[in-house]
């Protein structure tokens, strides 16, 4: 989720991309927290008392685990009022999975993304897929330019450490003689990108337009490098207004 570049599946700012996306799975969590999440996934919202009875734990033990899960952003509490016969409504707190919490469970977005890219290319032609990738790049440019477009190049490069994910601990910036190197060690789209490398052209083109200089990838996950390095050629300006989207294979 973490913030990023593509819309909904491809991370628009209004979709889950603006929120935290799990980078671990439910199976990697401690037993008690995993059991609570599994219970909420299976049965929906539940109170502390219901969870305690189901998991055979004390209410206090459940409460402590729920607090930790709330801090992680994986569950949230809602207060509702129940109406018992002959009594006024009483507030009850129930807990349920957040969107980020639901992403701890297995998803198959990568296979869907690959299938959609292939369907577009086969049904409408390769140029149609290229136009769609160009549209995605333009949307990223629009969002990013609004935030950093007025900054000098060095400051823009610092801001671009959040290019894929907000507060990304796996993105580094190096200054080199003729520009910068933006180093990404944890591509959030790795499975799709490994199968359909054309997706990476979105970042290369969007970075080029945002920075107003030529950007290339000098290392790639697809080549077995274990990372992507976007080389920013500070001495090779381009005109963002006339820059046409091109696949990496065309550069």
Image (cartoon, rainbow, N blue to C red):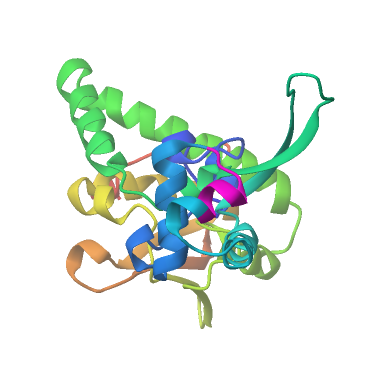
**Residue nearer the viewer, 249 or 158:** 158
Numbered circles on residues, count: 0
Foreground residue, 232 or 161?
161
- The magenta region covers 45-52
Question: x, y percentage for residue 196?
Answer: 21, 45
Q: Nearer the viewer, residue 133 or 233?
A: 133
Instruction: Name, please, the residue furthest toward the front.
Output: 86
Residue 220 can be seen in this image: yes
Please name whichever residue, 88 or 225, is drawn nearer the observer in this view of the structure: 88
In the displayed structure, does residue 152 sit left or right of residue 174?
right
Q: Is residue 230 visible?
A: no
Residue at image coords 25%, 31%? 117
Kindly identify the residue that appears in the image at 31 percent across and 31 percent down. Answer: 130
Furthest toward the left, the residue is: 122
In the image, residue 50 lies in the stretch drawn in magenta: yes
**Does residue 23 appear left or right of residue 98 in this picture?**
left
Quarter of the image for residue 162 reads: bottom right
Q: Residue furthest right?
A: 88
Q: Residue at x 57, y 62 (%)?
A: 62
Q: Is residue 147 magenta?
A: no
Q: Residue 178 location in percent, x, y? A: 50, 77
Q: Residue at x 21, y 54 (%)?
A: 194
Rendering coords of residue 8 (x, y %)? 48, 35
Give the percent coordinates (x, y) of residue 250.
26, 45
**Residue 134 left/right relative to 119:** right
Q: Is residue 165 above or below residue 198?
A: below
Q: Main secondary structure of the magenta part?
A: helix
């Amino acid at each position: 989720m973490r913030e990023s570049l593509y819309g909904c599946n491809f991370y628009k700012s209004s979709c889950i991309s603006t929120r935290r996306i799990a980078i671990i799975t439910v199976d990697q969590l401690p037993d008690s927290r995993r059991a609570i999440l599994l219970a909420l996934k299976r049965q929906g919202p539940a109170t502390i008392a219901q969870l305690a009875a189901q998991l055979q734990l004390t209410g206090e033990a459940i409460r402590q685990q729920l607090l930790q899960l709330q801090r992680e952003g994986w569950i949230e509490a809602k207060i509702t009022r129940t109406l018992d016969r002959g009594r006024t409504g009483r507030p009850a707190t129930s807990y349920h999975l957040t969107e980020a919490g639901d992403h701890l469970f297995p998803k198959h977005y990568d296979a869907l993304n690959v299938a959609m890219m292939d369907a577009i290319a086969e049904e409408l032609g390769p140029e149609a897929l290229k136009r769609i990738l160009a549209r995605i790049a333009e949307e990223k440019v629009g969002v990013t330019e609004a935030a950093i477009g007025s900054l000098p190049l060095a400051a823009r490069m610092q801001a671009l450490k959040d290019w894929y994910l907000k507060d990304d601990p796996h993105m580094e910036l190096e200054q080199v003689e003729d520009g910068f190197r933006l180093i990404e060690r944890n591509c959030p789209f790795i499975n799709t990108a490994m199968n359909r490398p054309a997706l990476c052209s979105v970042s290369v083109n969007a970075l080029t337009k945002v920075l107003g200089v030529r950007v290339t990838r000098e290392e790639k996950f697809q080549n077995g490098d274990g990372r992507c390095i976007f080389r920013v050629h500070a001495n090779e300006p381009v005109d963002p207004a006339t820059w046409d989207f091109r696949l990496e294979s065309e550069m």
